[in-house]
Image: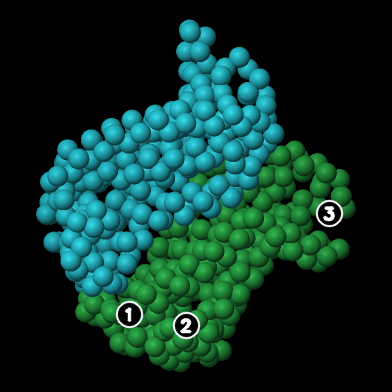
Chain colours: A cyan, B green
Amino acid sequence: MSELHTYRWLEAMHAPWRSFQAALFTGVGMVAGCQWLLPKLPAPAIELMRVGFRLDDMAAVVLFNDYAAVYFCTFFVGLVGMLGVVAVPREERRLELLLVKPVPAGTLLAARTWPVLAMTASVGLGISLACAASAWSLGGSVAPAGALGAGLMMTAAVVLELAALGVLFVRTTDTMHAVLIALLTALLPLMPTAAFLYRPDVFVGHDALTAALVTANLVWYADMLVWLGPAALGLALVVAAGLVRAGGGRLARAGV
Amino acid sequence: MTLALLRLDVRAGLRERKIWFAAAIYVYTLLAVPLLLLNPPPHVAAAMSAFFGDQDPFTFFMYVWTDLAMNKVVAMLGVVLAAGVVLRERDTRVLPIFASKPISMPRYFAVRATSACLVTAVLYITTQLIAVPVFMARVPGFRPGEFLAAGLLHVWAAMFATALAATLTVIVGRRGPGLLLSLIVIMTLVGMAFLGFYHPAWRSIALLNPFALGVEAVGHLGALGPGVLLPPMLGLAAICAATILVGAFAVRRLEV
């Protein structure tokens, strides 16, 4: 057991830490950039977002854009990490070297996946804290705790998506094909939001659906997200645990 | 010989499984975009007249088509087609085979990157040609000549995205971090493509972004001609060539 402990520790040491650091700094930089850039834009560009997404003030417009930074920065870096779990070794024909060690396939997958998911969640938390700081300094309609919760909600979505993609990546032979599928997975949940800007008439009478699908909900329900965001991240990690197990089973059956 | 290799590589590139996915994405945008235009709300109409100086529904169509659909798709596909050119060969241990052929590494990189750009262009232009009858039937006030002319400029932005992904990845020298950098840089640049229209005072600075050159036609739809189209087109062609050249220099550092 202690040997497996050492093994897990070694795998964690070999996760792409530098990439995660870079993504964290980039995300925080983007939050700072939004806060600098958006108030400088002329009124029509701001009004399009403010009226279109039913936001109260400039602070809400800035944070709405910040949440996209949380989403994409954590997703992109998590994606690179998830590819390194099995897909890249398989493509580079060194997966058999990993699988002939006296470590069961499921344990191997878990030991290589969890550092990535944990770091993804940490990067999301870091950028969410930057969102909270931004909300605090803007002093507008969104409370810092609401901004933090909203960022964590985005992080939860990313963790869930990556864990599900991890199951898919177990049998991938072409990593760029996997990247294409992953990018589509990332864009899919944002499509209702784009539709909402240009066709709000379609959403009339579907209040529950609008509240659930349009990501401006991160601003609309900031008060609720104070507890819902962290809870969602916790739940996402629990579901991810199930998905990692499923992926391990799939790897054991698939082999090299 | 280089040209023969280029031709073969483009043909092989077009037969990859990814291309079917890419084609499916283009078909989806073709079918989805007209639905977004059916009933524009007042806030969108106000923003369009502020950005582009007219209330023409065709300008609105071109903005949504270029910004929401094509810009995102070309950024995504550029990365998927080109991030990892040469590095994938190195990591899968087949690069020594290519290195033993009578072609230098910089030239090999240039051929592969150019081939990825040409695959991008083929996909883009095919989509444009298929789009003309579809949009003529489904988009009221659609003007095929201006649509194709704007596309002939924007396809160079698509090729730039591809060239940039190829070059950034070889500069970084590792596929994972290179992929991450390409995704973040290209998505950020694409996100700011229309900045010059949002903030006219920043237009000259905004045009330093190659993707801003690619969308120039959208702001001058009534007056499209060689005077409007050729300067950004030539500029983008030069930027593409320079980008590939930088990558060709960087690739010399790689150990085979």
User: Badge 3 is on which residue?
Assistant: B103
**Quadrant where the image shows the N terminus of chain B:** bottom right
Residue B179 horizontal/vertical position (percent): 54, 47
User: Badge 1 is on which residue?
Assistant: B38
Query: Rounded to the nearest whole Å, what is the CA distance between mark 2 and mark 1?
Result: 13 Å
Disc nearer the start of the sequence (3/1): 1
Disc nearer the start of the sequence (2/1): 1
Q: Residue at x 53, y 74 (%)?
A: B154
Q: Residue at x 30, y 72 (%)?
A: A198
Q: Residue at x 29, y 52 (%)?
A: A66
Q: Residue at x 17, y 38 (%)?
A: A227
Pointers 2 and 1 within a single chain: yes
Q: Is residue B82 above or below residue B176?
A: below
Residue neighbourhood size for the residue with mark 2, other residues' Cα within 10 Å, grouped as few (<14), some (14–19), many (≥20): many
Disc nearer the start of the sequence (3/2): 3
Question: Chain letter of disc 1?
Answer: B
Residue A19 horizontal/vertical position (percent): 48, 38
Tell me if residue A26 can be seen.
Answer: no
User: Badge 2 is on which residue?
Assistant: B135
B174, A186: nearer the viewer = A186
Residue A83 horizontal/vertical position (percent): 54, 39
Q: Amino acid at mark 3?
A: Ile
Q: Quadrant of residue A242?
A: top left
Residue B164 horizontal/vertical position (percent): 57, 58
Q: Amino acid at mark 2?
A: Phe
Q: Is residue A81 above or below residue A54?
A: above
Question: Mark 1: which secondary structure?
Answer: loop
Question: Chain letter of disc 3?
Answer: B
Pointers 3 and 2 within a single chain: yes
- Residue A254 has which mark? none
